[in-house]
Structure formats: structure tokens, C-alpha cells
Amino acid sequence: MSPTYPSYPSGRDVLRESVREQRRDVALGSLLGSGHQIGEALVPVLIGVVIDRAVTGSDTGALFLWLGVLAVVYVALALSFRFGAWAGDRSAVRSEHSLRIALVRRVLHPGGGAEEGRLPGALANIATEDAKRVGGVNTAVMYGIASLVGILTCAFVLLRTSVLLGLVVLLGTPVLLWLGHLLSKPLETRSEAEQERAAHASAVAADLVAGLRVLKGIGGESAAIDRYRTTSRDSLRATLKAARAQAFQSGMVLSLTGCLIAVVALVGGRLAAEGSISLGQLVSAVGLALFLLGPLETLAWVNAELAQGRASAGRVAEVLATAHSVTAGERALPQRVRGAVRLAGVSHGGLREVNLDIAPGELLGVVATDPAHATDLLRCLARRADPDTGTVELDGVSLRDLDPAEMRTAMLVAEHDADLFEGTVRGNVTAAAPESGDPEPAMTAAGVAQVAQTLPEGEDTAVSERGRSLSGGQRQRVALARALAADRPVLVVHDPTTAVDAVTEAGIAAGLRQVRKGRTTVLVTTSPALLSVTDRVVLLDDGRVMDTASHSDLIARHEVYRAAVLA
């Protein structure tokens, strides 16, 4: 029976799981919010009733009765607002959370593609700020529905009082909403630009922090500061433009709202002067006109939130809709992976018609005279990209026909710039190790045991984000130990010892050969110490296989080889 591998649902599948709960929360919040708005609209109506039935007629009993009714309405207002706001906020948080999970799943999907052309800081900004803005749309929709119910309630009451007053509200509100929508268009455009600039600034900042040691080493702090200052100023200008657009939109909508309220008050006053409505009805009409300010302002806010939400939703959708770099095949790996790797006519990037057979259990060295060609080879072996032509096979099965996740349980490609995780030294080494495996041989072979002796808490020493609390050589040894401890049938390692001294490198070379004995291992490197322990070495020159022989034979045969490994 074939082993079971984890499934990787798409971003759409993840979002679909939570949309039902979000709809329920929005519906509940809208219902409670609508009840709150109806209660708010009834308050001036009840005050008018009190004036007409109790104050004008000096009826104390009626006064206390209607004051009691007002008290009940206020209690209902408080409860409906509290629980309605809770439902709306919960819906927004759930939406934000599901979007963030969907984005993380998409970025980490074995098929890749989402990270292409995007810096990590930009992706982080989309998964935080943009996801938060899109989640806030749920709250905006809830408040928008409740505000519309409040306006309709107000219009209904005014229609019962006077058809003319009701028509002013019913006809004026749609015009106001349409104008508010038009005024939100510049905000939507500028909000999208603001988020783009903010994401770029975050990406540049993360990039600079990651290379801080290198910048200090070469004295490049001033250039880095100038670069970030320029990016930050661009982001600030975009933010100010968006803020000005939002202020203009809010101010204009508020002015238009004031005009509508003034018309309602003017018409109501004229009707009262003519005797068409009572004093209490006039007070109710003026109170309802003032009440309208709340829901109309809310609708203006909703318009702004929807404009910003649409801009952020476009950025989120762009990531989720990014095509995968590679697709999953339908074949399964053999029950027992022998570790035979074959490249047949592989062309990709700078590689040209590469043909290579790696026997099960072989320790193979690969020297590429152009580092870009080494990177192209690693991309094909890790299946981060499929070759333009030709095939890469594992035990006779083309990698194109395998699920990338399943393939990587058998073949691990440990890249030169692999990062460590926040945690402990031992936790990093055992991150991908089998539960029943013993990490000690891998730690010894990679020299991590020696590193642990120099650390304050040994293997349990805390490692900061991306391993920055360790030196370059220490990070490389921990990363190599992690790859060895994973115990894959096929292991491809890229330049694992560039930051260690010669004595340590020789020890790692011997330990690596010992711990990987009987399993297929490919060392893509120019290190003489590592190449000297391999069974044979492949020389890649100008993207083609130029020769295959032992390390010593290639040194004797080829000037380009000597230049690559002895320079």
C-alpha cells in the first residue's frame, strides 16, 4: 500500500470552509444592528408621543407610561448594540484569519509560484494589512445594512406623519449614496497605491535587516539608509494622498448629509407652521432628521471601507490566483525508494542538454563553473521548476508525474542560503527528522556537537529569527545537520561549508560520507575537501556536462576545473 501524504488545499478551499460561519455572523450582526437602528429611530417618535399625549394634556400617568416605554427601548438599544458589534467584529476577525491562513497555505504550497517576483516583506504586508482590511468589509456590510434599515424606518415614520417629509428622505438618500460612491473612487485608487508602497517599504526593510551584517562589513550603511529613506518617503506620499482623498470624501459626504437634514427640518417646520402636523410630530421630525446624521455618516464610512477593501482584496486575490510553478502528477513513488536519479536531455535556464545518471547509494560531486548553472540544476532537482526540455527521474519515475510534496519526502535539496528557525539548536536539527530517528550522528557529522560546546546552553541554546544569533559558520553547520537528520533516500546539498575553516571542513567531509553511506548524495560545491571524498565528480561547463571522473583526475585534466575549485 502506498504511503499517505498530506493534502494541500487551495486558498479557495480554505476560504470556503469559513464563509458559512462568516455569513451567519454577518446575518446575526445585521439583525441586531437593524434592531438597534429601529430603536434609535423610535426614540424621537416616542418623545413626540410623550409631548402630544402627556405633556400637552398634563397627563402624569401617561407621562410615566411612555417614559417606561422609553427605558425599555434604551435597554434593548444597549443589548442589541453590544451583541451586534460582537457578531460583526467576530466575523471580521474570522475573515481576516481565514484569509491569512489561505495566503500562508498558498505561499507554502509545494507547487510554489506565489513567491515569484515578490519579496517576503511584501507578502507579509498582504497577509496582515490587506487581510485585515478585507476582513473589515464584513463589519462594514453589517453596519451598512443596519444603517439602511434605520433610514427606511425613519422614512416610514415620516411618511406616516407627512408624505412630503417621507419623500424627501426616500428620494434624497439614494442620491446621497450615489454621490458617496462616486466620491469613493479616488480613495479606492489611492488606497491601492498606498498599500503597494507600504508593502514595498516593508519588503525593503526586511531585505535590509536580513543583510545587516553584510552591510556593516562592507560599510554600506549609508547607501542602505538612503535607499530605505527614498522608499519610505514614497510610501509616505502615497499614504498622505490616500488620507487626503479620504478626508475629502468624508467632508463632502458630511456636507451633503447636512443639506438633507436641513431640508427635512425646513419642510417639517413649514408643515408645523401650517398646522398640518402637531408640535410633538414636529419634534419627532426634527429628532429624526438629526438621527439621520448617524446612519448617513455610517454609510459614508462604509463607502470608504469598501473602497479600501476592494483595493486590498485585489492584492490578496492576485496572490491566491497565482499559477503554480509546478503541478502535481498522478503517479506514486515506489514503496521503497532506491535513490537512482537520472537527468535526460535537461535544458533549463543556463543548462543545455544535461545527461546524467546517479547510481543508488552514490556520493556524487557536481562542479559548475557558473554559479547560475548550479542554481538551475538545484531548481530542477528540487522541482521548484520543471525543465524546459528533458526529464528528471527518480527510480525511473519522472518528477513531473509526482506530487511535489510526495517527491520531497524522498529527495531533499538543501540550498546554500537555507534559513534557520526561531527555537533551539536541537529543535532546528530535528525539524524534519523522523520521529524514530537519532539526530546525534547528523549533529556529529556536521560539527554541531562542537558548536554546542561553545554555546551557553549547549544544544538547548535559543536561536533567534533566521539564526542571526549564531555566526555564519555555526548557521551552516546547523543547517547541514538538519538536512542530514531528515534522512532522505536522496540528499542534494549546495555549498554547505563556505563559512567554516579548513580543519572543520575536512572533518565535515569525512563525517558526511560516513553518515550518508549507502544513500544517494549529491554535493553541488567547489570545495576541494568535499569533492575529495566523493565517488566521482561531474564538471558542468557552459551549461553542459564536460567530463565525469574522480576529483584528482579532473584536476589533472581540465584547467577550468582547477580554476573553479582551487582559485
Image (spheres, grey):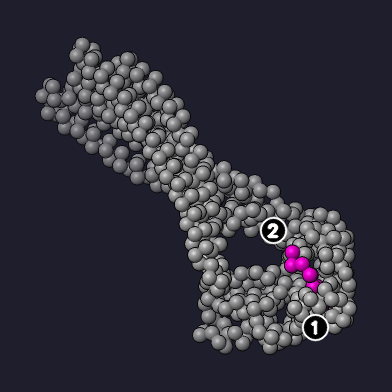
Residue type highlighted by circle 1: Ser
Q: Can residue 275 be seen in this view?
A: yes
Looking at the rendering, which quadrant does residue 349 occupy?
bottom right
Question: Callout 2: few (<14), some (14-19), or many (20+) C-alpha neighbours within 10 Å?
Answer: many
Q: In this view, does 395 lie to the left or right of 483?
A: right
Q: Where is residue 483 in the image (x, y as percent from the top left)?
A: 69, 74
Element type at mark 2 = loop
Q: Position of residue 518 (x, y in %)?
A: 81, 80
- First in sequence, mark 2 or 1: give its number: 2
Residue at 31% x, 18% y is 165
Q: In this view, does 394 lie to the left or right of 515?
A: right
State which quarter of the image contains the N terminus.
bottom right
Q: Nearer the viewer, residue 209 or 20?
A: 209
Q: How far apart are marks 2 and 1 (CA)?
A: 34 Å
Q: In this view, does 277 lie to the left or right of 427?
A: left
- Name the residue carrying label 1: 532
Element type at mark 1 = loop
User: Residue 241, relative to residue 228: is it above or below?
Assistant: above
Q: State which region is magenta.
A: 363-372
Residue at 81% x, 54% y is 388
- Name the residue carrying label 2: 110
Q: Where is residue 211 in the image (x, y as percent from the top left)?
A: 56, 67
State which quarter of the image contains the C terminus.
bottom right
In front of the other: label 2 or label 1? Answer: 1
Q: Nearer the viewer, residue 384 or 564?
A: 564
Circles 2, 1 touching at the beta carbon (< 8 Å): no
Residue type highlighted by circle 2: Pro
